[in-house]
Each structure stands twice: as structure tokens, then as C-alpha cells.
Image (cartoon, helix red, strand yellow):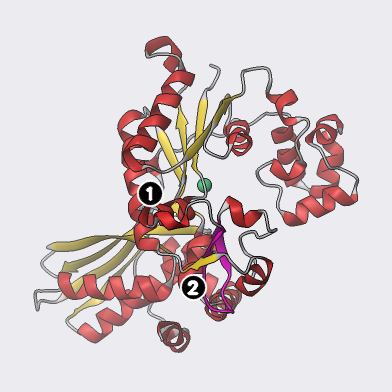
Amino acid sequence: MLKSILHLDLDTFFVSCERLMDSKLNNRPVLIGGTSDRGVVAACSYEARQYGIHSAMPMRMARQLCPHATVIRGNSVVYSEFSDAVTEIVKERSPMFEKSSIDEFYVDVSGMDRYVKQTYQWAQELREEIIRETHLPISFGLSTSKTVSKVGTGEAKPNNFMRIENGYEKPFLAPLSVKKIPMVGDQTYRLLRSMGVERVRTVQQMPVELMERVLGKNGAVIWKKAQGIDNSPVVPYYERKSLSMERTFDSDTTDVYKLRAIVIGMAENLAFQLRHDNKITACVTVKVRYSDFQTHSKQKRIPYTSLDHTLIEVVKDLFDKVYDRRVLVRLVGVRFSHLIGGSYQIRLFEDSFKLIKLYQAMDKVRDRYGQQAVVRAMGMGSKTLARPNPFNGQTAVANG
Ligand SMILES: [Mg+2]
């Protein structure tokens, strides 16, 4: 059956949230990110982009390019709330949807035309409702695949929408820059440019073998996307995997210091795993099973994050709340759920450049030495993670 997939993306989401809270920011260049000179731009308004500013640029450079820009430290609490409000509307109206990042959704509307109404009209009504209820600008693309719809959203922006009809995917993509194909990052783009490939049309005309030879396996995937071929499914929000760790003790314990250290270690390991997978979480659960097999757990919704120092505080707090019987403990566990993609931007606001570097360095060390421990703990489920965590010192720095 022919698929019909809608991609929705809130326009300059962080900036739009800030503008809802302070209308003086409307029509002005706005930079969001770390506010110190060592900070990094996480997001910027269209007015700032005209000065050549883009996300991931050092804040110092952005300030030089546009000295009259308003610089705001990002607020993941507020953005998470706005994101939830939009998610609720999408959830209520959609047969099946995927939240792919804090401000992006895919909805599988295949077959809807036959039962409900014209998909295109339905999508416009959904968009109007989101704008009416949240006052956030949002754009969408509608086509037969995730890739083409996402590219369509990008072409429709700002605050607009478009449909690419079945059979027109290839000509729609042809004149666009290869940079617009999802998956083509800076490195791939440079490589393609060095081969003289600038437009998607050129990739469409190349033999797939050539793309494979130059870019390996990814080359074939990019070639397919360039043809408008993409069968990847919409993964329902509720099926998004959570990350969790548990430990069952050989002999039950009431040693609260030991137990707390273990759940903190789990939080660190899982946070590393999140960053490694480029994901962020919005829900933390801590579980304690007593020797009489009574299991208590506590859950907390939190602003999206993947940072140790934030997650550890939540886990510690939940553990202290859930561990309320002074009875022998048989098992403890930590779970991060409500996972979505994209840790990068959200990490930039609370972080100075120094802190970002620190996390990168920590993660690099773990990639080399610690990943084994993470994999082992995840794979075996029980009786793991007894090792002391070597990053406590650095995490303390991150806390301060
Ligand atoms: Mg967006």
C-alpha cells in the first residue's frame, strides 16, 4: 500500500518559545545558548541567520557578527513544557505518530483518505489547531515517505506547508542542494562537493555503485533517499525504547550508602548511553525490590536532558523517596524513558563551552574504557555494575 507520511516541525522552536514569553523579541535577531563568551549558539532566529549566524557557532563569534542581537540562555524546562503541549495535540488527533525530537513529529496517515478526509486537509487542520492552541509557528511536509516529507517541511518553512504528490518525489528533490538530504552531514557534503556533486539531480543520475564506492554503505542509503525512496516506518511514540539497568544482590542489603552509590552509578552509565545514542530523556524511574518481594517504584517527569549532573540529582531524590522501608533490599533499578532524539542542542544552554568539552572528554574516555562496562551491564541484566565509577570526581566538577 502506498504510504502517506506527514512531517511536522516547529519553526525556530526555542526562539518561538522565548518570543511567546517576551514579545519584545519579535522581529529581532535572537541568539539562544550559553551566554558567556565561551558559550555556543544552540538556536537563533531567522533575523540572526541573515548575519551568517548558525547553530553550533561560538557565541563570541555570533556576537561579533551581530552585536545588537539579544542573547538568551536557553531554558529546557519551558521548552519541554511547550513541546509537551504540542505532543498532546498531535497525540489526540493522530492515528499513529513518532516524536523524533523536541520539536519534530512524523504521523503515518496512510489510508486515511479513504476513511476520514483528504489527508492534506487533515494536516492543515492539525497545524492550525497547534497554532491556535500554542501560538507556536509550525511547518509541515506531506508525501509518501519520511525523507521527502522532512525535506518538504524544510522547503516550506517558515510557518508554511507543502505536499509532494506521489510520483513527483524525484523532480521535487532534483534541484535542491545535496545538503538537504537528511544524513548528509558536513563531512559527507564536503566529500560530495569535492567530487563536483552539488545538486540532488547529480546523485540521481549517478550509478549507486559509485556512491557506494565513495561513501560505503551510507552511499547507497543516500542514493536511495536522493531518488525519493525511503521505506522507513513511523515508530510510534509509546514503542520508543527506554534505557534501564537493574541489579539484584547476591545477599540482600540495607546499606543505604551502597544502594545510593549504585543507583548513581546507574544514572551515570545510562546518561552516557543517552549521549552516545544522541538521545534525551524526559522521565526517570527508580525501583527498589525488598527481600519480601514487595516492589516500590517512583517516577518523575523532567525537562529533556542527557546530562549526568541533572539526572543524578533526580535519581538520588527518587531513591530517597522510594527507599522508605528499612527492610533488606534485593534489587535496585533505574530507568530513563520518554526518549527522543537530539541531545546536542539541549546540552548547549546550560553549558559553557568548558562544560561541553568536559562532557566530550568524559564520553571519549568512556567510549574507550567504559563502554564495555555499559554493554555488560545492559546485556546481563542482573549482578552487574559493582565496579566503582571512575568519573565521580569529574561529575563533581560538572556540578559546580
Ligand atoms: Mg524545528
Going by the image, does 30 lie left or right of 192?
left
Q: Residue at x 34, y 77 (%)?
A: 264
Is 91 magenta? The answer is no
Q: Are marks 2 and 1 in contact (CB under 8 Å)?
A: no
Highlighted range, magenta: 29-44
Q: Is residue 367 above or below residue 391?
A: above
Q: Which mark is residue 83?
A: 1
Task: Name the residue that disc number 2 marks.
Answer: 373
The kind of residue tagged 1 is Ser
For marks 2 and 1, give the CA distance: 34 Å
User: Is the residue marked by circle 2 packed among few (<14), some (14-19), or many (20+) residues within 10 Å?
Assistant: some
Using the image as rendered, state which of residue 140 and residue 332 is in the foreground. Answer: 140
Going by the image, does 150 lie left or right of 293?
right
- One can see residue 178 in this view: yes
Q: Position of residue 338 (x, y in %)?
A: 36, 52
Q: Residue at x 27, y 76 (%)?
A: 316
Q: Position of residue 329 (x, y in %)?
A: 18, 74
Secondary structure of the residue carrying tag 1 is helix
Q: Position of residue 327 (x, y in %)?
A: 10, 76
Is 31 magenta? The answer is yes
Label whose residue precedes the other's in the sequence (2 or 1): 1
